[in-house]
Image: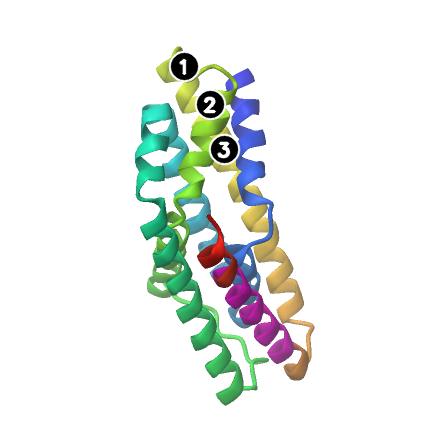
Amino acid sequence: MEPFLTGVVAGYGIAIPVGAIAILIVQVGIKCGFRCAFAAGAGAATADLAYAGLAVLGGAALARAVDSVGDSLRIVSAIVLVIIAVIGLRRARTSPEVTEFTYPDRSELAGTFVRFLGLTIINPTTVVYFAAVIIGLGVASDLTAGAGVVFVLGAFLASLSWQTLLAVIGGFAGNRLSSRTQTIAVVMGNLVILALAAVILISE
């Protein structure tokens, strides 16, 4: 049970801090409802699942490998965030009416899942974070296969539960906010994403 609880703590540790992905999940809920936002959150949680698994398999060596190309991945991450923010701001300016909700069909849900999987997986700090947790606890060298699976499962379920909460918040707010308030929320969210991109670019 200890590896599972460790995974849960690690999963919440990487998921809870409010960042661009969290903001986007809430925005998706505001725009098109809970189901679409849940698909987005599931994509983000799946990326955490993949990185937790890689961290278990690679440990310290993997963390060093990712760190060696961290600058390039950091720049790519920032560019992607800027593009997302610019597109979001343009849509908010040209299409202020966002109160009419359309619930995606299966293909759209799948596309949303894949998009957020990709957006989350370009963040190299996630695998370094999970590797640091494992190494910091001193279990990197003797973590059994079974314990590793349990750790990864705990991390995934923790991340998914948090992303689902964000989806609920977005879906709940979207059905109750006025058109003007929704537009303001979208604009503010995209401005925050631009700020996060700037922080990523200037950080070491």
The tag earlier along the polypeptide, 3 or 2, is 2
Q: Nearer the viewer, mark 3 or mark 1?
A: 1
Is 15 left, or right, of 131 in this rendering? right
Q: Which residues are magenta?
A: 182-197
**Which residue in the protein does label 2 denote?**
134
Question: Do callouts 2 and 1 mark residues in contact (Cβ within 8 Å)?
Answer: yes
- How far apart marks 3 and 1 lie (CA) works out to 15 Å
Q: Secondary structure at mark 2?
A: helix
- The relative height of residue 137 versus residue 12 in the rendered view (above or below) is above
Could you tell me what secondary structure mostly forms the magenta stretch? helix
The amino acid beneath tag 2 is: Ile
Of tags 3 and 2, which is closer to the observer? 2
Dot 3 or dot 1, earlier in sequence: 1
Q: Which residue is mark 3?
A: 155
Q: Are marks 3 and 1 in contact (CB under 8 Å)?
A: no
Disc 1 residue type (three-letter) = Leu
Q: Which mark is residue 143?
A: 1
Report x, y in % for residue 119.
39, 56
**From this viewpoint, which residue is outermost toward the top?**
142
Q: In the figure, 94 relative to 28: above or below?
A: below
Q: Residue at x 57, y 73 (%)?
A: 186
Q: Is residue 143 above or below residue 198?
A: above
Residue in the image at 64% along x and 71% along y:
175
Q: How many marks?
A: 3
